Amino acid sequence: MRRISRALFVGVLALSGAAFAAGDAAKKPAAPAKAPAAKKPAPVKKVAPKKLTPVNAEHKKALASLFGQFKFGMSKDDVLKAISKQLDEQYDEKLKATTDIPTQDRLRKEKKAELARVEFVAFEGKRTGWDVSIIEDEFAHNTGESMLVRWENEAGKNQRRFFFFHDGKLWKMFVSLDVSILPEDKKNFDTFKGVMQGKYGPADVDANVMTWYAGEFQVRAIDKLKGYDALALTIEDTRENKEVLALREAKKPPAQETSPVIKSVIDADHSDHPDVKNTGSSAVDEVIKAQGGAPPKK
């Protein structure tokens, strides 16, 4: 009887120890489950920078001739002085060609009136007559931009040349080319593209714009035939172009699309400014000649 009791006691102790062990195990918190490994982000595909068409030294010199007497960085007064000098040279020849006093007086008045027609516009938020025009994409408001416009009407021509300033310094010029004298079958962008690249070399072509990147400056040839029956050239300071475009983007107001119908009504007869379709320059005359037309008579 004593042996049975001892064995029973040992068994009870064994069971008790197992129970305590089980209880301790139940009290211990379960080990946290391992989080799934984070997925590696997909590698970003690098976009190769756009390869620009090189401009050789000869073509760069030809493009630089489009500057004429003007240089980037000129102030408004500098440009006005250069224009006045051009008029002096132009009218001096006319004055020397006649000894008639009334004719000379008339020529002097014409010269003075032509200089007075040079228009200055500051783009400070107030709508101007140029907001819907051939140059509507060439400026923005409230970004320190302004413009001088010269009406060149020698020999009955109705020409416009635009000088664009940023913070008071010239950074871009815009000239509209006269295509009215060309035959209809040559009045198209493909013909223009062939002539321009023949004169200035291969360009980067994007839709209706050709661009020559010549280092410190760049030139754009733009198709404006559909809206204005004109072709245009711009000469721009490359560094300033980037700064101005970045500033415009930072200060751009919410987009408000103008109805094409309203747009056509607003600019139906250009009543707020003269026609700018027949604009050109001596450099442009050569382009026109190359297309089979005759340049305007000087």
Image (cartoon, rainbow, N blue to C red):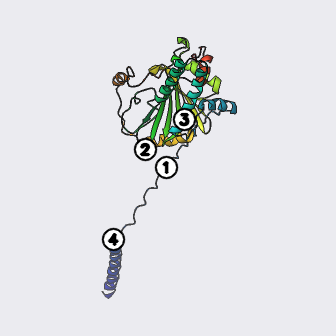
In what element is the residue under mark 4?
Answer: helix
Quarter of the C terminus within the rendering: top right
In what element is the residue under mark 2?
Answer: helix
Give whichever of discs 3 and 2 has the lower sequence position.
3
Instruction: Please name the amino acid that badge 1 sits on.
Output: Pro
Residue pointed to by mark 2: 250
Query: Can you tell which mark lies on residue 81?
Result: 3
Q: CA distance from mark 1 to mark 3?
A: 61 Å
Which is in the foreground here, disc 3 or disc 4? 3
Q: CA distance from mark 3 to mark 2?
A: 34 Å
User: Residue 113 placed where, x, y %?
Assistant: 47, 26
* Residue found at x 36% / y 33%: 127
* Residue found at x 44% / y 42%: 144
Residue pointed to by mark 4: 26
Residue pointed to by mark 1: 41
In what element is the residue under mark 3?
Answer: helix
Give left or right: position of 95 versus 260: right
Instruction: Please name the amino acid that badge 2 sits on.
Output: Ala
Viewer-closest of 39 and 232:
232
Give whichever of discs 1 and 3 has the lower sequence position.
1
Which is in the foreground here, disc 4 or disc 2? 2
**Label 2–label 1 contact, CB within 8 A:** no
Badge 4: residue crowd in 10 Å (few <14, some 14–19, many ≥20): few
Q: CA distance from mark 3 to mark 4?
A: 97 Å
